[in-house]
Amino acid sequence: MSSLEFWLSTAWWVMFLFLVVSAVIDWKISARQLDGLNAVRLTPASLALGVDNKIILQITNQLDRPVRLIATDDFPEEVTATHLPRQIEVPVKGEAAMEYSVHPVKRGEALFGYIRLRIHSRLGLWQFLLLRGQNQRVKIYPNFRSIAQYKTLGLHRHIRQIGIHVMQRRGQGMNFHQLREFREGDSLNQVDWNATARMRKPIAREYQDERDQDIVFLLDCGRRMHNKEGELSYFDHVLNAFLLTSFVALHQGDAVGLMTFAGNDRWLSPVKGQNSINTLLNQVYDLHSSTTTSDFAEAAQRLMNAHKKRSLVIMITNLHDEDAEDLKACIRLLSKRHLIIVANLREPFLQDMLHQDVSHFDSALSYSGAVDFVSKRHRLLEGLRKQGVLIADALPQQLHVSLINEYLALKRRGQI
């Protein structure tokens, strides 16, 4: 071996040993300091389906040097996330925060895992993956944003904004409430002549709508509720309508209960008080549609066994003409004790088919099929009306408007 080869070989080994020693020292020094990096996740107490929310990752650096790292989060499958992963620099002995957006796509209990921090060693020879924070469970509720708007804007103002008809009937409910001075617009039938004589001025009786009635929702969880309208399933729209109508009923002083059928059987006895909306939310937030065929007669029998008091029963479903016999048996049984509203979800795609241009043979077949289906269902609903059943027939996104209108109309007529 020549002297040049010897010195080159020696230099190579010296450099190799230097790198190995540097890597070991870099590893040991950096690994000892990793405990100085921590992270916590700040999440809302709960999330609402389809509503974007911000999640904040707060990273603390106790090291004697600034740290540049890449942070990401182990978010659950029930949400989609944007703005991850992110690079962030944390100052010496300081902290930094980053936020990302989540969009809930499925209701239920969501589990956030660890916060993942990817950081280089001091000399940049190693890359460490740190798991920080802890598992967090967050409930994803049906979209309760409209309920929050009801509370913020006031019930009567907001329900007018979404197209619900409220008829002002000052002091003309069913139950006596109080005596007060006669006002312009009051009916002469409201005058209390004895009180007027005693007080020597016109005194009117004021009435309020009857309260303390039971409203029981009968929710169909069957296979048809899997269908989607936009981002939400039919069943998501059913729950939104259930919660909004329940909020109005609770505000009116009525009690609201719940029974589900077709795969996910739950029962909640009627509860009252405006804060009971939270009880209803917690009862249904993790409830999903099933692959089971709906059995209306069996559901009616369960309800008759579970609830003896005369009530307004609101059944929310998606009817087809083949349901006719089973549904008639259900109605015959329920109507022995209860007043019934059947709320049917109309399929938006059928509406589109009925309004499309018929320009070729395939579109003509589609149009004819849609007309036949809609006609048969119309006859089914008309048959229910003849049995004394009240009908709310609406597209999924308008179901809550139709239901609340029907409920308030019953209150105005004094039927509940």
Image: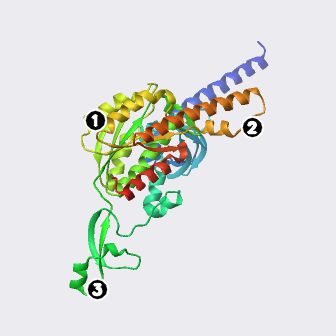
Which structural element holds mark 3?
loop
- At 38% across and 45% down in the image, what residue appears? 281
The N terminus lies in which quarter of the figure? top right
Classify 10 Å Cα crowding around label 1: few (below 14), some (14-19), many (20 and above).
some
Classify 10 Å Cα crowding around label 3: few (below 14), some (14-19), many (20 and above).
few
* Residue corresponding to mark 1: 304
Circle nearer the N terminus (3, 1): 3
Left or right, 394 with respect to 213, comes to right
Query: Residue 213 location, x and y as percent?
Result: 29, 52
Residue 357's tag is 2
Give the residue at the far bottom of this rendering: 200
- At 33% across and 61% down in the image, what residue appears? 209
Kind of residue at disc 2: Asp
Query: Residue 47 location, x and y as percent?
Result: 46, 46
Which structural element holds mark 2?
loop
Taking 42 as reference, is 159 above or below it?
below
Kind of residue at disc 1: Met
Kind of residue at disc 3: Lys
| Count of numbered tags | 3
Taking 168 as reference, is 309 above or below it?
above
Circle nearer the N terminus (2, 3): 3
Taking 15 as reference, is 171 above or below it?
below
Which structural element holds mark 1?
helix
- At 60% across and 26% down in the image, what residue appears? 20
Q: Is residue 67 visible?
A: yes
29 or 378, which is in the foreground? 378
User: Which colour style is shown?
Assistant: rainbow
Q: Is residue 116 visible?
A: no
Q: Are marks 3 and 1 in contact (CB under 8 Å)?
A: no
350 or 57, which is in the foreground? 350
* Residue corresponding to mark 3: 201
